Image (cartoon, rainbow, N blue to C red):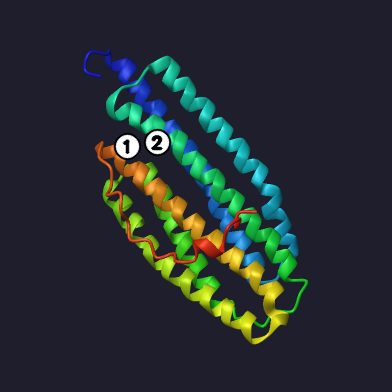
Amino acid sequence: MPDEPKHIVTSFEADLKKLRDMIANMGGLVERAVANATTALLSHDPELAARVIESDGSIDAEQQNVEQFAVRLLALRQPVADDLRQVIQALKVVTDLERMGDYAANIAKRSIVINQVASNFPLAGLAQMALLVQQNLKASIDTVGEVDPQKAILVWRADQMVDDLYNTIFRELITYMMEDPRNISACTHLMFIAKNLERIGDHTTNIAELTYYAVTGQTLPDYRPKGDLTSTYMAGSSD
């Protein structure tokens, strides 16, 4: 925007910073929801799980705030080039964050059910997977605020480890169910929890891709090594 008065350009930069700050705030809510949902599962805490479910409304409200602000920027500022990409990025990122909030709530709901049935399945693998997902989620949100395409690439690549863990957990759960039919109910819920974590990981890579494009104007390769081999077995995992 070389022909615009300096005060207009400065004002728009302030608007873009506010937009990034709003995304960071929403991202923080989602990070907390994912962390609390995991803790509720691992510590058998139904009260914490209930708070995660209740918090989903706050995440949805924050999404609406960001969308309204972004649409206002489009209408009033009429940005072009990289400025336009940043506003469009924001609209798409909050959609990814909202979906992650839904998955966190789903994990919390299923953790409540699991706590009501006996399950001898070790949760160490799920705990490790959840930790990786949370690290990648935080990093993806940081890429938005820092406008860092190189960090975005690292996040984009890191999801492979999440997929590998998911496949391992899936196979172990299948084995537990085959060994003892009494494990089927609890293990089915754990499968869906693992799938929810895997989907949160996918949305973090979406945010990384959006950040890279917003900053560079280029897209990352269409193909990212995708380690999830269980999709055909997990239809409806976001229920």
Q: Please, which residue is most extreme toward the right here?
A: 116
> Which amino acid type is shown beneath numbered disc 2?
Gln
Q: Tell me: residue 27, above or below residue 82.
A: below
Q: Tell me: residue 154, above or below residue 76.
A: below
Q: Tell me: residue 176, above or below residue 78.
A: below
At 78% across and 71% down in the image, what residue appears? 116
Residue 210 location, x and y as percent? Answer: 36, 42
Residue 42 location, x and y as percent? Answer: 63, 71
Please give the residue where the numbered disc 2 appears in the rendered image: 89
At 50% across and 56% down in the image, what residue appears? 199
Q: Please indicate whether residue 182 sits to the left or right of residue 88 in the image.
A: right
Q: Please indicate whether residue 23 sits to the left or right of residue 239 in the image.
A: left
How far apart are the two marked residues, 1 and 2, measured between alpha carbons? 6 Å
> Which amino acid type is shown beneath numbered disc 1?
Ala
Q: Please, which residue is most extreme toward the left here?
A: 2
At 34% across and 55% down in the image, what residue appears? 156
Q: Please indicate whether residue 184 sits to the left or right of residue 201 in the image.
A: right
- Quadrant for residue 224, please give it: bottom left
Along the line of sight, the residue nearer the viewer: 84 or 236: 236
* SS for callout 2: helix
* SS for callout 1: helix
- Quadrant for residue 145, please give it: top left
Asked whether the residues under the numbered discs 1 and 2 touch, taking CB atoms below 8 Å apart as contact, a structural biologist would say yes
The answer to whether one can see residue 146 in this image is no
Residue 112 location, x and y as percent? Answer: 73, 64
Along the line of sight, the residue nearer the viewer: 103 or 171: 171
Badge 1 local density, few (<14 within 10 Å), some, or many (20+)?
A: many
Which numbered disc flags the more N-terminal residue, 1 or 2? 2
Q: Tell me: residue 116, above or below residue 19.
A: below
The answer to whether one can see residue 8 in this image is yes
Please give the residue where the numbered disc 1 appears in the rendered image: 214
